[in-house]
Amino acid sequence: MSERRKRTGGAAAQPHRREGATGRTLRFRFDGREYAGLEGDTLASALLANGVRAVASSIKFGRPRGVYAAGSEEPNALVQIEEPFPEPMLTATTVELYDGLVATGLPGQGRLADRPDPARYDAVHAHCDVLVVGAGPAGIAAAGVAARAGARVILADERPEPGGSLLGTAETLDGAPGREWAAGEAAALAALPEVRVLRRTTVLGHYDDNYVIAVERRTNHLGAQAPADVARERVWRIRARRVVLATGGHERFVAFAGNDLPGVMLAGAARTYANHYRVLPGSRAVVFTTNDSAYAAALDLAGAGVEIAAIADVRQAPGETWAARCAERGIEVLTGHVVTAAKGEGEVSSVEVAPRPEAQGSGGQAREIPADLLLVSGGWTPVVHLFSQAGGTLRYDEELGAFTPGETRQAVEAAGFARGVRTLRECLEDGAEAGRRALAAAGFAVPAEIDVPAAGEEPAAAPAEHVWLVESGDYGTHFVDLQRDVTVAEVLRATGAGLSSVEHVKRYTTAGTAHDQGKTSGLLTGGVVAHALGVDVAELGTTTFRAPYTPVSFAALAGRDRGPLHDPVRVTALHEWHVARGALFENVGQWKRPWYYPQQGEDTAEDMETAVLRECRAAREDVAAMDASTLGKIDVVGPDAAVLLDRLYTNMMSTLKVGSIRYGVMCRPDGMVFDDGTVIRLADDRFLVTTTTGNAAAVLDWMEEWLQTEWPDLRVHCTSVTEQWATVALVGPRSREVLAQLAPGLAVDNDSFPFMTWRDAEVAGIEARVCRISFSGELAYEINVSSWSGLALWEAVMASGEVTPYGTETMHVLRAEKGFPIVGQDTDGTVTPQDLGMEWIVSKKKADFVGKRSFARADSSRPDRKHLVGLLPEDTGVLLPEGAHLVETSALPEPPVPTLGFVTSSYRSAALGRTFALALVSGGRERIGERLYAPVGADLVPVTVTSHVLYDPEGARRDG
């Protein structure tokens, strides 16, 4: 910990706050100590006001790091917010101070919260004629022109208040402080009916067709006082006709020894702290620059009370006006000089300055200057991230020493410094012209004349000199990426290994991959690579700019899809009835399905077996009903509907007659089972496809994928209608009797209503579609009605006699007794229809279908493929655990133990009077009658392999 930090602190002490600072006092805690700041501070400015220099430590070397910048480009000052809710990896420069803030410094990585986030997050969609990104001088000018012509305008800026560069300078517009002009213009724009001014809103990504994503931080700055009913952050999904990018620029630093010490800071950032936050980041400063902008910073700081010990300018000839102004204030200007090292224990205490080797003729010796602040300006880089994301090309500006926007095919353009415009006056004019062009392109009348405020006179600028590093014999502490601890030495190691692409060097060294995404270090790294290779920076180009522009929280991206809303809970129209009857529920996909219905004395988990056996007996011996509404239902309509289904299913669907039903299986291209269900032909050009509950969305997506990518010529529309229908499965020997009672107008005998057909009828006075389908092997019907009528139908069924409701566990037992597989339980993505004993469902007549070619592979007909078989434990009371592996011997050999397969389903059967299981076993059909062994606890239980159809193999019971 630095001596300055030890000496300062205390709730009231703000020793580096300038006189005249106003605002409500806010109390906060950092690294366990109490401090005070002012309303309007960031955490960074408040810490600097209290003399806190070391804010964090570096991720690799553990070196102390201080505040380096004043905005989202900050590479160093990472913090973790502890209260009111933990949030890691935030930059102190963008955390607005609030009363009660508790934070700690981070070594480049943080920790996630150990409790649920109580805040809300949401998302909105917006459309506009002109989106302006950046509320600096150019952005405000562009938005003003567009808005006053009647266009729908969105002006978005990441800061709490508009003004951009004006906030950190003493520049004037129309004779008044620039920030006052910006505030007034923004207020006037916000008052217009077709304008949105979004503060604290960062545009993260720019995509095709001017689709833009932004995140608005709505209550982060309020801390514990944030209203519970207002979203903390909001994602804006904006579609704009024209986009103006007035994103400004980032100042970059220079690589020299110790350039990471607390007390080293970008010159423009120090100017912002002095002017905007009225905080002095040090008391005695040395300025190191390659361009004129640092002179304005030096003079502003000198006027605020910081002693400027010297300005080391790499150039021989800085701007004459700037040099004269410095001379008037007694500031020494060392031309042709560089800073060779920042020195100090834990923070800057002195700066070593020396003439550049090529400037030796100018005289002068290396010297060490006592200072606690070193301000660096290695030039400015336009923020071209969004322009590049939008597909724009970049060109190298020799005068600026940076890449600027070139051409783009999208309706987007850059304005102001974002496209390399230098002076305030030029930025205002350029922004206004960008607004005019956007208006014209959007079809609005363009005003003949545009007034822009008058900016103060600016000194003529001298050409900048582009210096990337100060040469040395040891580059071990010449940092090019402060967050990743990447040094010049590492870059030289990469180029020495033969890497010549800046993209490859980025990945070799990790430079530019941290939270700041190389905003201050990206071009510097390229400059060092160019220096090492002896090529021009323009030849190297840049790394790829990708979204997001700044880090975004997962909570914001998730929006309200968190907690119970992360995966929507879906319930059927009969759900409240099930709840009222005490049903326990099972999650199937997103659905809550009744698992079983415990009666009195069956309330505990141990009693589940009793309840399920009771429900099974009712279905096998009497009559029972199940809510089958969750089965996926897809309406397939169009002249080519039969063609589509023939291509997707292994069996023929085009020959199905209207009024009939056919069971079908879909396979992946590799021939493995994807889903199964029934296909109901409603008309020549219309089918209703049913799917498994959990696979409904996947099957619909599968159909659309083939239609849109492979067979766009097919005239077919597929629509999910799962929630439009309520389905009641009526099962058991008495089901025909109950249906006849409920639907007196429907002929229900076998001849009139055969298996795998459907009929329209009135059931309990409700229009219904009744299907003769059985997933239990018993006489059964599936009665489908509008979901609005589902509860009325169910209650009528329950009132028609002693009908037992049953749940999914009973359904599983009934179907397993009959050897009906469930996709996803009795299959694992490596199972063909033939493996399931369903060769009959693979058509030999069709020329092709998805997966057919794969059945001809030698691997698909291997004799040792796993087949679906039944297992009967020799001890009829032993229930095999699902997933248990099967072995050939009664004693396990030394590992690795060869296994033959595994148990997929295991149940206790009322009809069989014993336990049984289904399993996938290598060469299983050839092993029927063999004894295998399955682990149950510490024992190996003997089991006999049998057919997977264990009950009514003749199928006699399905017709009653």
Image (spheres, helix red, strand yellow):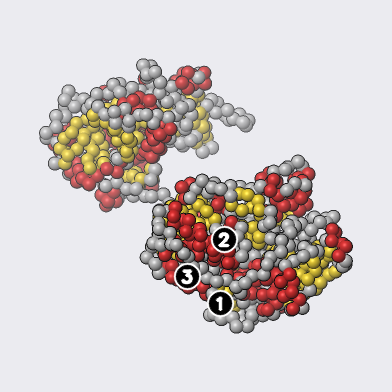
Residue type for callout 3: Glu
Label 2: state its secondary structure.
helix
Of tags 1 and 3, the one toward the viewer is: 1
Residue type for callout 2: Gly
Label 3: state its secondary structure.
helix
Residue 587 sits above or below residue 65 on the image: above
Q: How far apart are marks 1 and 3 (CA)?
A: 15 Å
Q: Name the residue under label 3.
A: 185
Return the mark for residue 478: none
Q: Could you say which is closer to the camera, residue 484 or residue 926?
A: 484
Residue 884 in sight: yes
Residue type for callout 1: Gly
User: Residue 37 in the image: x percent, y percent?
Assistant: 59, 77
Residue 878 in sight: no
Q: Name the residue under label 2.
A: 416
Q: Could you say which is closer to the camera, residue 686 or residue 1?
A: 686
Q: Could you say which is closer to the camera, residue 481 or residue 29?
A: 481
Question: Mark 1 or mark 2, which is nearer the start of the sequence?
Answer: 1
User: Residue 871 in the image: x percent, y percent?
Assistant: 43, 28
